[in-house]
Image (spheres, rainbow, N blue to C red):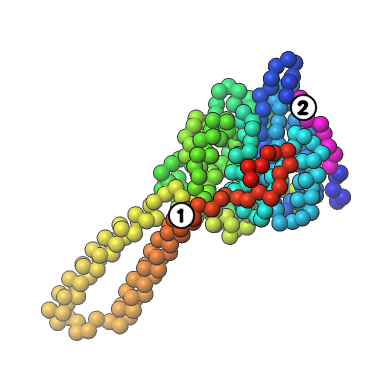
């Protein structure tokens, strides 16, 4: 199918009927999107801006984290052809979490809504989000109520992750709620005070602790393009979330150590008893090997858990920037 041509639209004036309109910033990470996806996104944004021009001024910030020059060219064309659109181009791929943070840092709206470029975060929900925000609710969450479009494996791992994070995290992270949400400017400012490098944005949003309400929706199927989050990246993201917001993986080894020590002591008493009563002369070779292999495996798992935390301490200690900006359009860069 031939991609639709992207046409420029002029921005809506910030003065409407003699009063200053409230501004909402849409932060859209872009990563190697195809032309059809970007064309559909532009059409959807154009319709949204037109439909709400009587009450809201929109600022759209594309954060291009791509390595694909064709995608960057499309993003540049959009930003240069419409002054309601702005763009940030990273010097290399820094990841979605960094792209979201960059968008939040440069957003000038009274509220901010992060969303995906593939329109699986429905633009149709945004007017309802804004309506709830105008009632005084600082955070409006969009919650998925149907994961039937996901593979069985993805549904299983998502369920497992939310069960683990819900049980062991020190904060309440909403289940089946992604980055798609509305946040008042004061919430965004609070989020930006967290300057950590190992970023799990869903946890950071929840950590801020503001009052919220939930809008439920069924996520539409992806019409164009493909997922940018294969299983390996989802697993990495899940580990980041669990390690960043829970110390349970560390504490569990103390509990396991006491349990194993107790079992070892009890087993040693049994062996001594059998030896004294001459019921056994030499302990079995098989049981000895099993115990050695089990102990070695436990040690390796333990070192792996410690390594996850130590590696994060190492990264945080270097204090490298979250991202490096190569170019901006419509934004006064901080570099």
Q: Which residue is drawn at 60% across and 36% down?
A: 181
* Vertical position of residue 99 compared to residue 285: above or below: above
Is disc 2 placed on a helix, strand or loop?
loop
Circle 2 residues within 10 Å: few <14, some 14–19, many ≥20? some
Residue 230 on the magenta segment: no
Q: Is residue 116 left or right of residue 69?
A: left
Q: In this rendered view, identify the residue nearer to me: 157 or 58.
A: 58
Quarter of the image for residue 297 reads bottom left
Is disc 1 placed on a helix, strand or loop?
helix
Quarter of the image for residue 67 reads bottom right
Q: Position of residue 214 (x, y in %)?
A: 56, 33
Q: Which residue is drawn at 63% across and 25% down?
A: 131
Q: Where is residue 321 in the image (x, y as percent from the top left)?
A: 56, 50
Q: In this view, does 306 lie to the left or right of 84?
A: left
Tell me, yes or no, if residue 56 can be seen here: yes
**Structural distance between the alpha carbons of marks 2 and 1:** 45 Å
Looking at the image, is mark 2 or mark 1 earlier in the sequence?
Answer: 2
Labels 2 and 1 touching (C-beta < 8 A): no
In the picture, which quadrant includes the C terminus? top right
Q: In this view, does 215 lie to the left or right of 67?
A: left
Circle 1 residues within 10 Å: few <14, some 14–19, many ≥20? few
Residue denoted by label 2: 12
Tell me, yes or no, if residue 148 can be seen here: no
Range of magenta residues: 6-13
* Vertical position of residue 265 compared to residue 211: above or below: below
Q: Where is residue 222 in the image (x, y as percent from the top left)?
A: 72, 48
- Mark closer to the observer (2, 1): 1
* Vertical position of residue 204 compared to residue 253: above or below: above
Residue denoted by label 1: 317
Q: Residue at x 28, y 64 (%)?
A: 260
């Amino acid at each position: 199918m031939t991609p639709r041509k992207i046409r420029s639209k002029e921005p809506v004036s910030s003065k409407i009927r003699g009063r200053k309109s409230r501004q909402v910033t849409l932060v859209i990470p872009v990563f190697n999107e195809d032309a059809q996806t970007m064309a559909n996104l532009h059409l959807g944004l154009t319709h949204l801006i037109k439909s709400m021009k009587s009450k809201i001024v929109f600022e759209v910030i594309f954060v291009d984290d791509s390595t694909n020059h064709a995608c960057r060219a499309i993003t540049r064309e959009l930003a240069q052809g419409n002054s309601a659109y702005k763009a940030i181009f990273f010097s290399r791929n820094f990841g979605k979490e960094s792209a979201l943070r960059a968008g939040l840092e440069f957003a000038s709206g009274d509220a901010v809504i992060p969303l995906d470029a593939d329109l699986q975060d429905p633009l149709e929900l945004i007017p309802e989000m804004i309506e709830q925000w105008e009632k005084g609710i600082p955070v409006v969450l969009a919650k998925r109520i149907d994961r039937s479009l996901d593979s069985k494996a993805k549904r299983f791992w998502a369920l497992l992750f939310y069960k683990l994070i819900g049980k062991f995290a020190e904060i309440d992270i909403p289940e089946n709620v992604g980055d798609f949400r509305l946040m008042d400017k004061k919430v965004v400012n609070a989020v930006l005070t967290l300057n950590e490098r190992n970023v799990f944005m869903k946890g950071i949003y929840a950590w801020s602790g503001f009052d919220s309400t939930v809008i439920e929706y069924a996520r539409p199927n992806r019409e164009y393009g493909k997922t940018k989050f294969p299983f390996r990246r989802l697993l990495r993201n899940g580990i980041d979330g669990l390690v960043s917001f829970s110390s349970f993986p560390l504490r569990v080894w103390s509990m396991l150590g006491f349990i194993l020590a107790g079992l070892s002591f009890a087993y040693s008493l049994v062996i001594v008893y059998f030896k004294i009563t001459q019921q056994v002369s030499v302990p079995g070779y098989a049981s000895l090997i099993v115990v050695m292999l089990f102990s070695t495996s436990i040690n390796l798992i333990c070192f792996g858990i410690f390594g996850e935390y130590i590696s994060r301490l190492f990264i945080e200690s270097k204090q490298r920037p979250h991202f490096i900006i190569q170019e901006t359009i419509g934004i006064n860069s901080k570099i």
